[in-house]
Image (tube, rainbow, N blue to C red):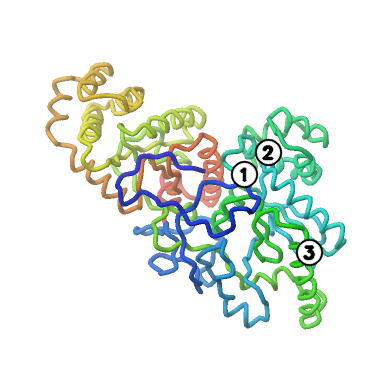
């Protein structure tokens, strides 16, 4: 998702990525990525390595998902596959062509599990090019009956208003054993809306009260975010994106292109099964040594969602119980309009999640903006009187449009001792705490405001409420798993963010 944010330093402004593929390719695109360098890599990214993704933080961190292995290969760019080397281990196994190992084990699929050709499609139900791409896949399935396994991966584009809802409903359909009828119905025409989605769901016989309950509870958020993480890991920026036995095809290419690759893969599958036995898992053989991620070098392209960052709470202002399953650490600036927008989102989340959510506030301020620094001091002067959150809420209600006199006016509005407030505000007493927050933000790799960490996992910018709720669903599941293992509530956050 795009990251509306106030950037802290000129040097941190992100440059536009270079388009490495023909612009005529038929795709729906998200925002351009940070620039990447097309050089092959032979080891997966880890802290401090030359191949590490741009977002590798300078501070200690751990991976969140277990999806990546230190022994696996990482490609430095996805869209320019012709520039990549075949990994040595893949070459030694006699597997030609650059390939990417897409995990298909938990994804919806149709066709034989042992099919010689597996086509993975990252798609968006509102993307017209995905509809065209699906028609090509359908033709391939008809022409090569019993030889194709088709695997769906969700990649809803930010600009498509109903794409996430459609993807979540598709997972609900899968839970009711009606994924493919619903999938095909959605692609039967464009122009989706909540009402149209409900009508299609009813048409294929879904239990609608169950569908709506699962939408409200985000029952399938973990499955959706699994696909989104994998797409991001492979540098996917557009739909449709295909992988045929791990070979990358971007966009709705011609039927002849698909036929050519399928013919090559069928011939290879026949050869491999002669050499290794008729029961060979062709997809595993073809992709076992393929690239498993895309590394971006030469840029610090933001925080990495695949990492848990050890963000200490310390003595920062917080609301919500310390034993909450969700801890949301906010790095923000009262003078940042995006932080004001984010504050409204966080307020809705607090109302929705109640005691399951703890919010912690830390200051991340641009250099030289005296009013922002003064506002931070004022908030801590309010905290000294036990009124940080009333002051915080009242100041953000001004939507970043305030001057120095407004700080005293807000203090009066929340009934602070004005004499003490003024003395503390002007004293510089809290500068060390502000500096400590600033130092922590820098160590973590925070480059703009607002930046959030949910149990250590980052969200950058003033994202919509749904983006938080999807991540919250994952983190609630992670917290519940630790509690079931016997972790004490008092140790939950420390355990969630530790290595």
**Mark 3: secondary structure:** helix
Q: Nearer the viewer, residue 309 or 300?
A: 300
Mark toward the start of the polypeptide (1 vs 2): 1
Q: To which quarter of the image does residue 391 belong?
A: top left
Q: Quadrant of the C terminus?
A: bottom left
Q: Picture coordinates of residue 453 (x, y %)?
A: 42, 45
Q: What residue does disc 3 label?
A: 259
Q: Which residue bears the numbered disc 1? A: 156
Q: Is residue 78 left or right of residue 63?
A: right
Give the SS element for disc 2.
helix
53 and 410: which one is in front? Answer: 53
Mark 2, other Cα within 10 Å: few <14 / some 14–19 / many ≥20: many
The residue mark sitting in front, 2 or 3, is 3
Where is residue 271? Give x, y as percent.
Answer: 79, 79
Residue under pointer 2? 166
Q: CA distance from mark 2 to mark 3?
A: 30 Å
Give the CA distance from mark 1 to mark 3. 27 Å
Q: Is residue 132 above or below residue 51?
A: above
Sort mark 3 into few (<14), some (14-19) or many (20+) by Cα contacts within 10 Å: some
| Quadrant position of residue 110 | bottom right
């Amino acid at each position: 998702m795009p990251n509306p944010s106030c950037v802290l330093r000129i040097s941190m402004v992100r440059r536009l990525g270079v388009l490495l593929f023909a612009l005529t390719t038929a795709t729906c695109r998200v925002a351009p990525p940070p620039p990447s360098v097309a050089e092959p890599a032979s080891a997966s990214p880890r802290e401090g390595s030359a191949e590490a993704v741009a977002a590798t933080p300078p501070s200690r961190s751990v991976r969140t998902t277990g999806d990546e292995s230190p022994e696996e290969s990482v490609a430095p760019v996805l869209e320019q596959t012709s520039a990549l080397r075949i990994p040595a281990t893949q070459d030694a196994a006699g597997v030609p062509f650059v390939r990417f190992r897409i995990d298909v084990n938990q994804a919806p699929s149709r066709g034989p599990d042992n099919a010689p050709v597996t086509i993975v499609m990252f798609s968006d139900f509102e993307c017209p090019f995905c509809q065209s791409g699906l028609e090509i896949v359908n033709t391939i399935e008809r022409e090569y009956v019993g030889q194709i396994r088709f695997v769906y991966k969700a990649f809803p584009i930010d600009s498509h208003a109903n794409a996430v809802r459609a993807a979540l409903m598709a997972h609900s359909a899968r839970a009711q054993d009606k994924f493919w009828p619903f999938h095909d119905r959605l692609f039967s025409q464009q122009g989706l809306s909540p009402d149209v989605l409900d009508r299609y769901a009813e048409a294929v016989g879904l239990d609608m009260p169950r569908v709506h309950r699962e939408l409200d509870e985000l029952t399938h958020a973990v499955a959706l975010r699994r696909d989104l993480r994998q797409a991001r890991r492979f540098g996917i920026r557009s739909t449709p994106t295909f992988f045929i036995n791990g070979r990358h095809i971007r966009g709705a290419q011609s039927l002849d292109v698909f036929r050519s690759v399928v013919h090559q893969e069928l011939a290879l599958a026949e050869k491999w099964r002669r050499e290794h036995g008729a029961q060979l898992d062709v997809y595993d053989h073809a992709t076992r040594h393929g690239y498993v991620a895309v590394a971006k070098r030469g840029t610090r392209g933001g925080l990495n969602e695949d990492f848990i960052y050890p963000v200490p709470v310390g003595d920062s202002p917080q609301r919500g119980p310390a034993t909450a399953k969700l801890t949301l650490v906010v790095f923000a600036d009262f003078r940042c309009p995006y932080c004001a927008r984010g504050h409204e989102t966080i307020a809705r989340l607090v109302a929705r999640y109640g005691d399951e959510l703890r919010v912690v506030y830390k200051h991340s301020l641009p250099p030289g903006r005296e009013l922002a620094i003064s506002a931070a001091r004022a908030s801590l002067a309010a905290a000294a009187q036990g009124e940080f959150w009333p002051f915080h809420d009242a100041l953000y209600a001004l939507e970043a449009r305030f001057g120095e006199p407004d700080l005293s006016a807000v203090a009066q509005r929340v009934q602070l001792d004005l004499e003490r407030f003024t003395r503390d505000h002007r004293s510089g007493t809290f500068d060390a705490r502000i500096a400590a927050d600033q130092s922590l933000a820098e160590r973590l790799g925070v480059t703009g405001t607002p930046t959030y960490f949910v149990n250590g996992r980052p969200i950058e910018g003033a994202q919509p409420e749904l983006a938080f709720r999807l991540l919250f669903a994952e983190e609630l599941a992670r917290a519940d798993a630790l509690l079931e293992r016997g972790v004490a509530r008092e140790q939950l956050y420390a355990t969630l963010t530790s290595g």
